[in-house]
Amino acid sequence: MKVVNLAAALAAFDTHWDPHVVADYNDNDVMVVKFAGEFPFHRHPDTDDFFLVLEGEVMLDVEEATHVLRAGDLFVVPKGVLHRPRAVAEAKVLLIEPKGTPNTGDPATAAKKPRL
């Protein structure tokens, strides 16, 4: 058990679209990530995708709709639904995913998830 300071965790790296695990929650990874630009459209066939915007603004394209998320907004994309996050300026986000879930939906193209 330990206290995790999310601001300090986010200050520990400068990369974008590179989730870092900050805690374990049941069989899930709790991660922080910085968004800038566009992430590819993708889907997760076996799990929902949880986004909590900590700072900045994220546009979440979900199939035919775009949802604008600001600091404090949470959005869950249901499993199997095509989506992509994007941000004009850097945004800081908390993600929760089952351990081993590839961030692109495809293990071959997924980013590694280093632990802070």
Image (cartoon, helix red, strand yellow):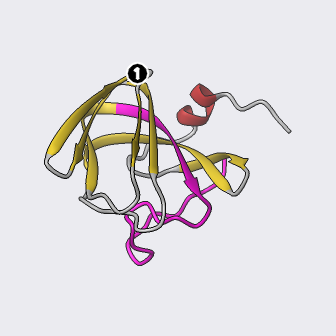
Q: Quadrant of residue 100?
A: bottom right
Secondary element at tag 1: loop
Residue 16 at x, y percent in the picture = 38, 46
- Please say whether residue 39 is visible from this viewpoint: no
Say whether residue 82 is left or right of residue 106: left
Q: Judge whether residue 107 is colored magenta.
A: yes
Image quadrant in which you'd find residue 75: top left
Q: Which residues are magenta?
A: 91-116
Q: Main secondary structure of the magenta part?
A: loop
Q: Nearer the viewer, residue 33 or 70?
A: 70
Name the residue located 63 percent from the left edge and 52 percent from the top edge: 29
Q: Position of residue 28 (x, y in %)?
A: 64, 54
**Residue at 67% of width from left, 27% of height from top?**
5
Residue 81, above or below 4: below
Which residue is denoted by mark 1 in the rendering? 71
Q: Residue furthest left?
A: 64
